[in-house]
Image (cartoon, rainbow, N blue to C red):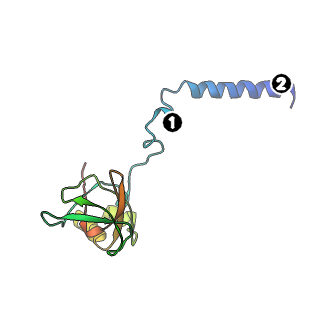
Amino acid sequence: MTGSLSKIMTVTLGALMLGLGTSSATASDQDPAEVNDLPGFGVWGPAYRLRNVPEGMRLVVRSESRRGAATVGSLTRSATEILVLNCAPEIAPLAFEDASPDGKRELLGGAWCQIDHYGMTGFVPGIYLDPILGR
């Protein structure tokens, strides 16, 4: 590299680094959960609450998407803020977005969904999930 080209690259690199350094919020300043976070879409968009759980009963959360799988925990009938990680069979995001609230429940009704509820992760039948819409 010639001396003048090296000086130009050094000045340019220094200016870029200086520009990055003046940013008021960097990725390291943000909550790690918010870095590169996109709004949810489809079945992953809303938080969920439970439905169809009889009074006094709890919903069993399983290690796999089948009734005979090991239990990892359970949810109270009043559980809310449940996150859906995926469902099988997969629910098409656009179909879910375009569906009415009853249509969303119908799509969920035919699937097993992997959920997370405050760190407890496992599978539940989608018939028990109700999207919390309109927030």
Q: Where in the figure is residue 49, as x and y percent of width and height?
A: 24, 57
Res. 100 in view: no
The vertical placement of 130 against 5, above or below, is below
Mark 1 / mark 2, whichever is N-terminal: 2
Amino acid type indicated by mark 1: Ala
In this rendering, position of residue 131 left or right of residue 123: left
Q: Where in the figure is residue 85, as x and y percent of width and height?
A: 39, 59
Q: Which mark is residue 4?
A: 2
Q: Where in the figure is residue 130, as x and y percent of width and height?
A: 24, 61
The structure residue drawn at horizontal position 27% and vertical position 52%, both measured from the top left corner, is 81
Mark 2 secondary-structure assignment: helix
In this rendering, position of residue 6 left or right of residue 86: right
**Residue that mark 1 sits on:** 27
Amino acid type indicated by mark 2: Ser
Marker count (numbered): 2
Within 10 angstroms of label 2, few (less than 14), some, or many (20 or more) residues? few
Q: Quadrant of residue 117?
A: bottom left
Labels 1 & 2 near each other (Cβ < 8 A): no
The structure residue drawn at horizontal position 39% and vertical position 71%, both measured from the top left corner, is 88
